[in-house]
Image (tube, coloured by chain):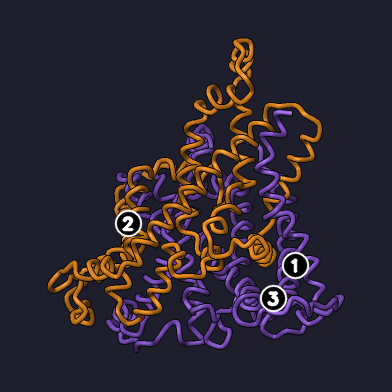
Chain colours: A purple, B orange
């Protein structure tokens, strides 16, 4: 009995606000449902899904998050790994560097966006520095060619610290005896890196990169904050979740259609999670 | 892996310091802009980022306007109560799943694990409709209650409780302590480090949360600091010194806590992976 009493609050909250809503979202996705006139809700079968697959903005949003993931994930992994290798190479002030690199991660997305809007503005510091090299000033966030890239750079900046910490933990898990044995055999730094460090870090890298791709698919705060919820200019920074939000709450109030988009996103994420579990299953033993 | 060569180490220091400038630079620039008079902002770069006549007038202006006090209060209430409830309920459930045998345990544990895979964006619309039915939109209930339990937190606490030697609890049981007594007086104190890491992490997550309060808080006096700051930014768009002074209220508490407790943060992030 006691066990159930202990579990009741969790079951009620998770049931009402997580499990129930998932089923409700799937149910809603088969309706034409407008929150302003709920009495007119109408069952339309897979109509919302058919519309979603033809919707050019939704396709654009998916394309954007794929570009985003393809650019951001490898970049943040490489920088994070290099920093982790440098920080753990026996330099002094290790703790100082770790603290400095991690600060962006603890900062609110609202503040990060404000700082970067300032940096990216026409009279901002980025244009100022580029001016030293004779590059003309542009408005980074209002230019369709640079807006997505700008958000990608900001995201790399704000997440590298987190991945560096994970890589550092992974590096510290590799037993010193491996390196000692390799050094006795006369292996160079690069050989040790190539044949010991990288293979043994593989589980960490795979895990972290798939988590990062899943996170990217759910990108919302930064494009919302940097573009006042519009995903502009001309959908250049539209993401899947931003489009769901815009459909449901951003003036269209199409809850049924937005639920169908959310369900599609959910299926994509489940597939990625499954792949991650499969890959992560074959963990390297040492 | 250690690098001993002196010349390579010199290059490493250059690279490490360069990257530290990249991460810390934007904050320093923000602080100095926040200390700059409006008529001097456009001159800032000519002075290498140092305000010609440093001033606190931007901060005074913000505090006088009144809204920020209310928003800070709301953020403290929402993040504080949310975190306390979360850590308490997660521990209770984690303990039951780790230590008590009862029918349906495996099933409940499996359900909780499954909810961890559900992305927040997917359930946003139903959550909103449910809160609407409950009449909790634009209220503290709506801001706090849906986040008083986290499946991931339950999972973590279960793992921690499983590592505590069971003999301690058996001894307490013989001494006549109830289940809750064992949990509250014996087991919980032993998990202080895990609890501390969870409190810091959850508080930070709730303090910085934007998506949810932006949806739920409709009236100005229910805004949390993140939502308020975003509104303030849109109203004072061209006054970077004031907007950046406003963002200090959100950032500085976090950075101070972080500087004192950074070991816990690092521990937390290695335990929790990239969740949160």
Tag 3 subunit? A
Instruction: Estimate the x, y position of residue B23 in percent, counting from the top left.
Output: 36, 61
Q: Residue at x 27, y 64 (%)?
A: B28
Tag 1 subunit? A
Mark 3 surroundings within 10 Å by alpha-carbon count, few (fewer than 14), some (14 through 19), many (20 or more): some
Q: From mark 1 to mark 2, how far is it between C-alphas? A: 39 Å
- Mark 3 or mark 1, whichever is nearer to me: 3
Q: Which mark is residue A35?
A: 3
Q: Is residue B246 left or right of residue B138?
A: left
Residue that badge 1 annotates: A263
Q: Please tell me whether mark 3 sits on a helix, a strand or a loop.
A: loop
Are callouts 2 and 3 both on one chain?
A: no
Residue that badge 2 annotates: B252
Q: Residue at x 80, y 66 (%)?
A: A27
* Placement of the N terminus of chain B among the 4 image quadrants: top left
Mark 2 surroundings within 10 Å by alpha-carbon count, few (fewer than 14), some (14 through 19), many (20 or more): few
Q: Please tell me whether mark 1 sits on a helix, a strand or a loop.
A: helix
Farthest residue toward the front? B135
Mark 1 surroundings within 10 Å by alpha-carbon count, few (fewer than 14), some (14 through 19), many (20 or more): many
């Amino acid at each position: 009995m006691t066990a159930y009493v202990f579990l009741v609050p969790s079951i009620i909250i998770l049931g009402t606000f997580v499990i129930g809503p998932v089923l409700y979202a799937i149910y809603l996705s088969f309706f034409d449902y407008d929150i302003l006139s709920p009495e007119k809700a109408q069952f339309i079968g897979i109509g919302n899904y058919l519309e979603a697959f033809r919707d050019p903005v939704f396709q654009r949003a998916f394309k954007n998050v794929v570009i985003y993931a393809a650019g951001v994930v490898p970049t943040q992994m490489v920088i994070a790994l290099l920093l982790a290798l440098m920080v753990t190479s026996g330099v002094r002030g290790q703790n100082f560097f770790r603290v400095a690199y991690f600060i962006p991660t603890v900062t609110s997305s609202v503040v990060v966006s404000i700082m970067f809007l300032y940096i990216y503005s026409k009279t901002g510091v980025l244009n100022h520095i580029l001016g030293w090299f004779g590059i003309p000033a542009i408005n980074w966030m209002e230019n369709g060619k640079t807006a997505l890239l700008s958000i990608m750079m900001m995201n790399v900046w704000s997440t590298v610290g987190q991945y560096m910490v994970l890589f550092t933990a992974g590096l510290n898990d590799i037993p010193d005896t491996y390196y000692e044995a390799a050094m006795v055999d006369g292996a160079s730094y690069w050989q040790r890196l190539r044949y010991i460090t990288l293979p043994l870090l593989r589980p960490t890298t795979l895990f972290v990169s798939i988590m990062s791709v899943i996170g990217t698919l759910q990108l919302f705060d930064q494009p919302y904050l940097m573009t006042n919820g519009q995903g502009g200019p001309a959908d250049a920074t539209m993401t899947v979740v931003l489009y769901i939000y815009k459909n449901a709450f951003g003036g269209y109030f199409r809850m049924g259609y937005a639920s169908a988009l959310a369900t599609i996103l959910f299926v994509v994420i489940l597939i990625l999670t499954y792949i991650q579990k499969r890959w992560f299953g074959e963990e390297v033993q040492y | 892996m250690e690098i001993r060569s002196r010349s390579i180490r010199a290059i490493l220091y250059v690279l490490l310091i360069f990257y530290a400038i990249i991460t810390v630079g934007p904050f320093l620039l923000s602080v100095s802009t926040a200390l700059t008079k409006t008529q001097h902002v456009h001159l800032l770069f000519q002075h290498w980022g140092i305000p010609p006549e440093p001033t606190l007038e931007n901060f005074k202006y913000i505090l006088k306007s009144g809204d920020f006090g209310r928003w800070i209060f709301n953020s403290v209430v929402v993040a504080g109560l949310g975190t306390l409830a979360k850590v308490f309920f997660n521990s209770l459930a984690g303990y039951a799943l780790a230590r008590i045998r009862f029918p349906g345990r495996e099933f409940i544990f499996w359900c909780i694990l499954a909810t961890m895979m559900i992305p927040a964006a997917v359930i946003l619309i139903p959550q909103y409709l449910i809160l609407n039915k409950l009449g909790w939109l634009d209220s503290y209930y709506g801001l706090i209650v849906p986040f008083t339990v986290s499946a991931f937190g339950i999972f973590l606490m279960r793992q921690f409780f499983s590592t505590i030697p069971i003999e301690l609890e058996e001894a307490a049981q013989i001494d006549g302590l109830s289940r809750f007594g064992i949990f509250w007086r014996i087991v919980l104190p032993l998990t202080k480090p895990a609890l501390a890491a969870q409190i810091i992490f959850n508080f930070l997550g709730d303090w910085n949360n934007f998506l949810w309060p932006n949806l739920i808080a409709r009236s100005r006096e229910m805004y949390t600091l993140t939502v308020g700051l975003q509104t303030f930014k849109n109203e004072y768009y061209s006054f970077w010194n004031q907007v950046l002074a406003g963002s200090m209220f959100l950032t500085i508490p976090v950075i101070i806590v972080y500087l004192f407790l950074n070991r816990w943060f690092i521990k937390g992030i290695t335990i929790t992976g990239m969740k949160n």
